[in-house]
């Protein structure tokens, strides 16, 4: 508010002054320049920017549309443009480059003192922030994806993010602030939008254009206010508001993109599959009759008949190689002195990779998702001291798609072998249904039938509205104000699946000369469509907040501020379970007091005093304080001579406690009893007719149960060089203790079984650092370059988890990171000599399968007891969540062209392959990499990538072991963009996930552990146009 | 001023929402509700019973399958307990877990949870309002019995165990919480005295609606078996296996000095149990209606003893699991002969071994290799034509129990309320088929335990005739007595001989003294009493323990199984004996397979627990 007033006054004064000056210049030989000045970040017009001919008094200021017109002497050399909060620009002038003045972009000066940063429940001046807070520009969050969180990886120092799937509606990234510090409950941060807690799903739907600011609160001083909810860090999003402007400003962005899977696992063709299946059989049992006859193999190879010798590309039948998406965003910002508004409407239309099929009973079974997000923020000044506002966000999402989950369809399409049965037979007898192929004894089914026979419709709506009021209380004491907020959120979802049940046929017999076949109906389906399932979900949230703010400067150098805030929240979601149906409630106070002396020495105290309904009355509230101190050395007098080189030098440190009140199950203090448990019943009687159910204690209550507490410490350094390069470095450590968990070390003879009591026992240490660097330089007016890099490293270590005393020290998880791999240590493949040594007892005997053969995996006998068993498992590799995420990139603007690229990487992570083994119980497909590189009698390569094949899973080889552990780190060209600006329009082409470098070759490494069979991550090629109208 | 406003605002806020966080409704279910009235207390009583192992579930009864009696044509999915005889039982993957809640493959009976539920019941039952004191007393006795019985079951599988004598509070200090195993003898004394404590409060007989509950006779019978086991070689001065089996203080968990008097204690307990059972009306079974042919009468006696519901032999029958409901888990569904031309139930997947079929006596009541009238050498190669079919002489002139228990090629099988002739050769009605995997791997079928009136005609015509699984049968008490007597007095005479001959008479065999001297080789008293026990209690889950306590594991539970050549179609070739290398070879490791492993997780949780030797 204060800075707003200053703006207004300054502006009026400047206009007056410059008008006077410009009168003097009329006599000279002049030339007229005119154009507009806009903000580089959002292309909004800058009102009141000063245009000045250097060394003269000639100048003007931009009007309410950001436009100016100025008559200058032909002899003018340099034109200077400046505006409060923006980096001043100097543009050389000559008669031929008048056009360059038509459109001038100004960049926000992040080092300017008046800059404001969003912090917990409020804002602070940037220079006085001494908590570890990272802000990101809304512009950097605009990527060709409908999920905001996909933009996080590598762009925000302190955030670890990975995107595991590209499925429309399910493609949000998983993200953690400074990694993971607990093994219980949620590990993801608290997300707050305009003061209200929202979910990660809500966050994904926010249109980046409606974001005013985005802050990541990392250390205790920034998060302590959130008390029992802030331990995993906090993301604070503020949406835009309108301004007092003459004409509304309209901004339109439209995009069209096409997506492709980045990298899918490949599978063998039908003939290779059959040969390898036979090889697997013979390899284990030389006397076995090959399952696939020579006739079948040759018939398939020669494509004799596609029904008798099927060779189905299931994946190709179900999926296409690309999908198309459209999005549009429109926003309008405007207002007058008394009322202002911001309106944003975003629309996404996304389609999936499913292929249309002419057989289909439904018009189109591909995923098709439409999403509308509307944001409407209105503020009104009721009196000189009273302001009210209403913010409204609604989201509507409609999704049509196959009834089966994508996971199922991808799995089946990739697993079912090509030669088992044809996808379908030509319909006979004038029937009205599809003759799907199948086999009576094949337990997996026909992927095409699964895809085609049902359709799903999902409809989801969210309304989030908040009302706020601000009242200045200067009449009580100067600098005091009060505010209040009430909000309501309602979410509902409907999901229905409808379809028919398919008819399945198999070939009964055929004539080998004519290939005429007789069909046998295996399953009688239905021809008409019925509703298979219908599900509803809903939830409501009510928030109330009231706060007092105080801010004042005493004696020009003593700056004091304080805040005290009360908040309460209730969340409800109806379920059939008693405890789940009770409201989730929290209540608390948050307070902050800051003091700085002369903008050099800073101190700050924060606290949260929170209560949760989850704990026993009397145990419900907890106190979470934090303290911080900072020293802005570059504001010292003695530092002045250095400021040309080091324009910013700040050190800061903080320490505090933050909690995590989530417990699973809820109400840990309550002993839960099931008084009607059939599993604990019994029967008596000569006719077995005297039966009663019994009771069971499903949970033993723990009176003292409470939240886990993180002790966070942080040390930060901010360095600005040459007014061009900014480096912010933070190192942190957190000890999360009292992690809520079920006891593990209770002797089983006590007899409470698996209903072990809960307790606050676990301890995890997490430390690391995050670094962000930004470099901006203008070589000339036409040539601007900016570079940035982010680096996040977070490594955790389990210190206590009530671990039973391991019989072998190497099996202890204490001291290991969370999400580690546990298994056997593979030592290559068994050789003939190894087998002799096993037989003679010289080498440990494998026990996971009845027999082992040459070419099976060899394991280390860690406890040297002569057998390979569960006691030989240990921890190895790196965690499944990367410990390091980094990103770097830059943008370059030359005249009307701009180019930017962004490269992102993840490192120190291990990917465990599992579920990849060929054939299984139903002759599943074989991956190309196994087909090409496995141990076999003909190629007894002891370093082969896969052991000796087996018909069904060989339990020696399928054990979790280092054999299946792969380095999951990768480096990818995450985004690249080329744009061209013409007047108020900018057209651009960009792409994401364009190129990936990784040691792991079998599927997209970001998909992570498992079999790689999932809706893949996508490569996106996008064209867009952006227009700004005033 | 400022402070006043803040304070005022705070007061207002805090007071207006004092109860904002207290949302738990007052009437949620608590453990008090489980003992609120008699109805709920009765459910709590049934809860204590619910920890009884499912004895009648063939796939979950550990005692039943993994022995010398059966051979299975099914993997360890069908018969999870067979890992016990394949030498694969380990502390990291115990085949069965009776100790704790950790889930094993299929067999998991957390008996210590049952014990806790018992103590919880005892601590609460006196406070239940409006209960008849007599009923309280009766229920308490049942629960106390179950506490002792669950300890007994643990002892039976694990040897020395942790004795739990009270409801252990969850805030017990660590030094008391992490209990040691008590020595085997301490455990026996503890269980025995706890049984003594409740016997007089248990009923002598039961109302039919309470059938399945323990009686005085049941308690005395369990005690008799407990003490018989305690006197047996495995646990009585076993220096051979257990010299180093000590707790952390160095105390031997299994005594190292043989004590003959333990047999005397067992003998007295058997006497007591017999008297008690007789008081309750128990006696040796005799099938009704009686037939004049004494041999056939004996066959009927043996055929129906196990399966005739609630007959007089039954001292304690198990009712907790109803065979009707789970047909894959039903012994009868798995054992009965296939319906020709039909898949599915009955599966015919488990069969008696050839060695079990050979154990039955001749009709004279002598072992087949000791009866001079039985052509032992040519038993598989000579045939007799009966009704135009060739029957191997192995099957002829055998004792009535053989015909009541074993189905053989061209023999009869009483099923579907009728009698069918078994055709066991390759591709025959009940023999190994060309395609499906369900067939008898030995060439024999088991009749014992399959009720002749069970109907398996088709999927729609299928009715099991249920029977309570015999936990204690009157015959066992005689056998307990005989064994204790012979081991103590070192001779077979007096009351022991009376009881032995009573059993032989029931089964249509001449008195032992009358045939003993006809034997072609000397037969020791110990052999005759042990063989009698193995035959009489075969297929009822006793071999598992009897052979172990006699330290005969390697003899009975080890090595390659011999079977008939089921891939043959002619009698001569079918009756050839082949060594079957089963999917699951029989490996008995001494000493470890004598006792079950405690799951490694339990040892990790309580480092005071000593693992059983060999694991």
Image (cartoon, grey):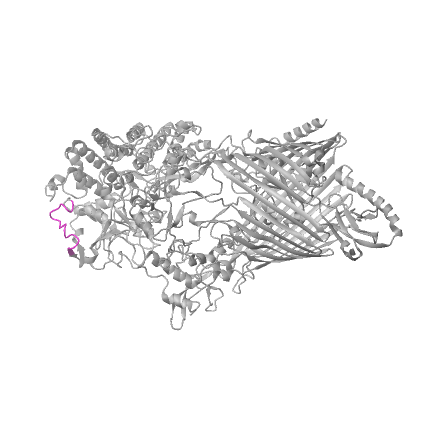
Q: Residue furthest right?
A: A27
For the image shown, how many numbered marks are present on the structure?
0
Camera sees residue B320: no
Using the image as rendered, state which of residue A528 and residue B569 is in the foreground.
Answer: B569
Front residue (pair A472, A902): A902
Q: Is residue A734 left or right of residue A522?
A: right
Asked if the stretch drawn in magenta spans residue B383, the answer is: yes
Decide: is B470 above or below B429: above
Question: In x, y percent, where is residue B297?
Answer: 19, 46
Q: Position of residue A640 (x, y in %)?
A: 72, 36
For the N terminus of chain A, which image quadrant?
top right
Quarter-wise, where is residue B482 in the image?
Answer: top left
Query: Which residue occupies the extreme front position in the image?
Result: A641
Residue sitting farthest toward the left:
B517
**Front in this rendered view, residue A829 or B230:** A829
Instruction: Identify the main secondary structure in magenta.
Output: loop
Residue A135 lies in the magenta-colored region: no
**Magenta region: which residues?**
B367-384
Residue B49 at what x, y percent from top left? 36, 36
Residue A242 to residue A694: above or below: below
Between residue B138 and residue A641, name the one nearer to us: A641
Q: Residue B284: percent from the left, percent from the top?
A: 22, 39
Quadrant of the rendered image containing residue B147: top left
Drawn side of residue A255 relative to residue B355, left or right: right
Q: Can residue B269 be seen? A: yes
Which of the 4 image quarters holds residue B120? top left
- B184 above or below A724? above
Residue at (76% x, 51% y) in the render? A91
């Amino acid at each position: 508010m204060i800075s707003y007033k200053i703006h207004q006054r300054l502006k009026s004064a400047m206009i007056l002054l410059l008008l006077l000056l410009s009168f003097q210049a009329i006599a000279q030989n002049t030339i007229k320049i005119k154009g507009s000045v806009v903000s580089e970040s959002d292309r909004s017009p800058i009102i009141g920017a000063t245009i000045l001919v250097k060394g003269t008094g000639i100048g003007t200021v931009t009007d309410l549309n950001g436009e100016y017109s100025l008559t200058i002497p032909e002899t003018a050399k340099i034109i200077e443009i400046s505006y409060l909060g923006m980096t001043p620009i100097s543009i050389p002038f000559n008669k031929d480059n008048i056009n360059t003045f038509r459109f001038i972009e100004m960049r926000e000066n992040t080092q300017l003192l008046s800059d404001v940063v969003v912090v917990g429940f409020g804002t602070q001046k940037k220079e006085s922030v001494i908590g570890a807070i990272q802000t990101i520009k809304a512009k950097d969050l605009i990527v060709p994806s409908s999920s905001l969180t996909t933009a996080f990886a590598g762009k925000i120092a302190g955030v670890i993010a990975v995107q595991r799937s590209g499925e429309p509606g399910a493609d949000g990234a998983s993200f953690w602030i400074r990694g993971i510090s607990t093994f219980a409950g949620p590990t993801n941060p608290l997300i707050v939008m305009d003061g209200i807690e929202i979910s990660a799903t809500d966050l994904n739907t926010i249109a980046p254009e409606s974001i005013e600011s985005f802050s990541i609160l990392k250390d205790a001083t920034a998060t302590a206010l959130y008390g029992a909810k802030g331990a995993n860090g906090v993301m604070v999003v503020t949406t835009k508001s309108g301004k007092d402007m003459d004409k509304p400003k309209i901004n339109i962005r439209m995009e069209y993109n096409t997506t492709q899977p980045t990298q899918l696992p490949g599978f063998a063709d039908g003939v290779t599959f059959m040969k390898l299946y036979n090889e697997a059989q013979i390899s284990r049992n030389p006397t076995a009759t090959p399952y696939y006859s020579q006739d079948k193999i040759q018939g398939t190879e020669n494509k004799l008949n596609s029904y008798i010798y099927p060779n189905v590309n299931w994946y190709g039948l179900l999926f296409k190689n690309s999908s198309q998406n459209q999005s549009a965003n429109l926003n309008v910002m405007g207002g007058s002195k008394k009322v202002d508004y911001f309106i944003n409407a975003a629309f996404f239309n996304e389609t999936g990779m499913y292929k249309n099929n002419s057989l289909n009973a439904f018009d189109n079974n591909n995923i098709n998702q439409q999403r509308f997000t509307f944001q409407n923020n209105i503020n009104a000044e009721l009196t000189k001291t009273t302001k009210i506002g209403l913010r409204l966000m609604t989201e509507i999402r409609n999704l049509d798609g196959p009834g089966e989950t994508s996971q199922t369809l991808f799995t089946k399409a990739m697993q079912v072998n090509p030669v088992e049965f044809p996808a379908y037979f030509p319909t006979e007898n004038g029937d009205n249904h599809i003759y799907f192929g199948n086999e009576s004894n094949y337990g997996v089914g026909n992927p095409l039938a699964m895809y085609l026979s049902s359709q799903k419709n999902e409809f989801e709506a969210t309304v989030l509205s908040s009302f706020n009021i601000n009242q200045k209380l200067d009449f009580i004491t100067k600098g005091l104000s009060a505010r209040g907020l009430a909000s309501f959120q309602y979410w509902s979802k409907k999901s229905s699946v409808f379809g028919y049940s398919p008819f399945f046929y198999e070939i009964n017999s055929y004539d080998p000369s004519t290939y005429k076949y007789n069909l046998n109906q295996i399953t009688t389906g239905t021809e008409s469509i019925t509703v298979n399932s219908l599900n509803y979900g809903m939830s409501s949230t009510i928030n109330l907040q009231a706060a007092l703010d105080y801010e004042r400067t005493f004696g020009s150098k003593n700056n004091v501020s304080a805040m005290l805030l009360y908040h309460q929240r209730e969340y409800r979601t109806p379920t059939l379970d008693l405890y789940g149906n009770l409201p989730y409630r929290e209540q608390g106070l948050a307070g902050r007091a800051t003091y700085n002396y002369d903008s050099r020495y800073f101190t700050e105290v924060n606290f949260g005093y929170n209560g949760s309904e989850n704990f026993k009355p009397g145990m419900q509230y907890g106190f979470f304080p934090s303290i911080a101190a900072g020293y802005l050395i570059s504001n010292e007098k003695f530092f002045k001579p250095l400021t040309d080189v080091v324009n910013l030098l700040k050190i800061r440190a903080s320490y505090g406690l933050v909690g995590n009140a989530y417990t699973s199950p809820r109400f840990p203090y309550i002993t839960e009893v099931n008084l009607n448990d059939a599993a604990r019943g019994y029967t008596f009687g000569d006719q077995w007719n005297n039966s009663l159910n019994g009771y069971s204690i499903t949970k033993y209550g723990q009176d003292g149960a409470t939240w886990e507490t993180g002790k966070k410490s942080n040390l930060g350094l901010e360095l600005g060089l040459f007014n061009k390069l900014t480096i912010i470095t933070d190192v942190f450590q957190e000890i999360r203790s009292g992690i809520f968990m079920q006891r593990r070390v209770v002797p089983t003879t006590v007899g409470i079984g698996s209903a072990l009591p809960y307790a606050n026992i676990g301890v995890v240490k997490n430390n690391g650092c995050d670094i962000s660097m930004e470099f901006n330089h203008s070589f000339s007016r036409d040539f601007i370059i900016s570079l940035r890099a982010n680096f996040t490293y977070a490594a955790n270590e389990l210190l206590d988890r009530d671990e039973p005393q391991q019989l072998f020290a190497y099996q202890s998880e204490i001291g290991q990171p969370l999400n580690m791999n546990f298994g056997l240590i593979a030592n290559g493949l068994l050789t003939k000599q190894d087998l002799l040594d096993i037989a003679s007892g010289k080498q440990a005997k494998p026990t996971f399968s009845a027999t082992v053969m040459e070419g099976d995996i060899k394991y280390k006998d860690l406890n040297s007891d002569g057998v390979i068993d569960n006691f030989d498992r240990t921890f190895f590799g790196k965690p499944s969540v990367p410990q390091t995420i980094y990103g770097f990139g830059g943008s370059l603007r030359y005249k009307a062209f701009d180019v930017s690229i962004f490269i992102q990487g993840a490192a120190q992570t291990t990917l465990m392959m599992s579920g990849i083994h060929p054939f299984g119980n139903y002759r599943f497909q074989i991956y190309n990499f196994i087909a090409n590189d496995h141990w076999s009698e003909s190629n007894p390569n002891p370093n082969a990538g896969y052991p000796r094949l087996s018909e069904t899973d060989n339990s020696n080889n399928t054990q979790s072991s280092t054999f299946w552990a792969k380095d999951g780190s990768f480096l990818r060209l995450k985004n690249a963009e080329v744009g061209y600006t013409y007047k108020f329009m900018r057209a651009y082409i960009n792409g994401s996930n364009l190129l990936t470098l990784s040691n792991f070759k079998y599927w997209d490494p970001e998909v992570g552990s498992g079999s790689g069979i999932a809706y893949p991550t996508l490569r996106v090629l996008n064209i867009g146009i952006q227009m700004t109208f005033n | 001023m400022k402070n006043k406003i803040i304070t005022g605002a705070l007061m207002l806020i805090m007071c207006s929402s004092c109860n904002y966080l207290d949302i738990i409704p007052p009437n949620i279910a608590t453990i008090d509700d489980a003992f609120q009235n008699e109805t709920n207390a009765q459910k709590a009583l049934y809860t204590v019973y619910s920890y009884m192992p499912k004895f009648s579930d063939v796939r979950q009864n550990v005692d039943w399958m993994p022995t010398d009696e059966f051979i299975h044509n099914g993997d360890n999915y069908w018969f999870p307990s067979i890992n016990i005889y394949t030498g694969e039982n380990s502390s990291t993957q115990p085949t069965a877990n009776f100790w704790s809640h950790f889930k094993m493959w299929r067999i998991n009976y957390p008996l210590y949870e049952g014990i806790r539920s018992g103590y919880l019941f005892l601590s609460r039952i006196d406070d239940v309002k409006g209960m008849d004191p007599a009923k309280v007393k009766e229920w308490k006795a049942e629960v106390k019995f179950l506490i002792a019985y669950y300890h007994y079951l643990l002892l039976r599988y694990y040897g020395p165990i942790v004795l739990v004598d009270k409801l252990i509070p969850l805030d017990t200090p660590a030094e008391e919480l992490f209990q040691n195993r008590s020595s085997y003898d301490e455990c026996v004394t503890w269980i025995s005295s706890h049984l003594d404590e409740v016997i007089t409060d248990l009923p002598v007989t039961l109302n039919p609606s309470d059938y399945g509950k323990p009686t005085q006779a049941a308690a005395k019978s369990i005690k008799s078996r407990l003490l018989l086991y305690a006197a047996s070689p495995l646990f009585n001065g076993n220096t051979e296996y257990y010299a180093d089996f000590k707790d952390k203080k160095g105390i031997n968990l299994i005594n190292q000095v043989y004590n003959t008097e333990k047999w005397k204690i067992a003998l007295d307990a058997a006497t007591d149990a017999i008297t008690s059972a007789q008081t309750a009306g128990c006696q040796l079974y005799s099938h009704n209606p009686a037939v004049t042919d004494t041999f056939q009468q004996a066959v009927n006696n043996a055929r129906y003893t196990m399966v005739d519901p609630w007959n007089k032999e039954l001292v304690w029958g198990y009712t907790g699991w109803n065979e009707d409901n789970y047909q894959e888990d039903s012994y009868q569904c798995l054992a009965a002969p296939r319906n020709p031309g039909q898949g599915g139930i009955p599966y015919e997947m488990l069969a008696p071994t050839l060695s079990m079929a050979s154990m039955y006596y001749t009709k004279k009541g002598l072992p087949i290799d000791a009866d001079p009238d039985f052509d032992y050498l040519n038993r598989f190669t000579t045939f007799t034509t009966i009704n135009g079919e060739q029957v191997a002489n192995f099957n002829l002139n055998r004792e009535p129990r053989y015909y009541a228990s074993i189905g053989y090629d061209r023999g009869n099988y009483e099923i579907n309320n009728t009698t069918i002739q078994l055709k066991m050769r390759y591709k025959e009605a009940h023999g190994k088929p060309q395609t499906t995997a369900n067939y008898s791997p030995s060439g024999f079928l088991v009749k014992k335990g399959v009720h002749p009136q069970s109907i398996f005609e088709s999927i729609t015509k299928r009715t099991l005739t249920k029977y309570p699984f015999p936990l204690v049968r009157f015959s066992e008490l005689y056998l307990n007595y005989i064994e204790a007597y012979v081991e103590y007095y070192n001779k077979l005479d007096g009351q022991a001989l009376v009881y032995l001959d009573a059993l032989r008479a029931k089964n249509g065999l001449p008195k032992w003294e009358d045939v003993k001297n006809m034997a072609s080789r000397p037969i020791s008293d110990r052999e005759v009493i042990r063989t009698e026990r193995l035959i009489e209690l075969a297929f009822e889950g006793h071999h598992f323990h009897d052979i172990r306590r006699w330290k005969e594991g390697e003899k009975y539970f080890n090595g390659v199984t011999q079977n008939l050549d089921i891939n043959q179609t002619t009698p001569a070739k079918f009756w050839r004996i082949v060594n079957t290398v089963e999917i699951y070879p029989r490996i008995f490791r001494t000493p470890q397979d004598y006792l079950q492993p405690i799951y490694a997780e339990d040892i990790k949780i309580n480092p005071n627990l000593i693992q059983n030797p060999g694991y």
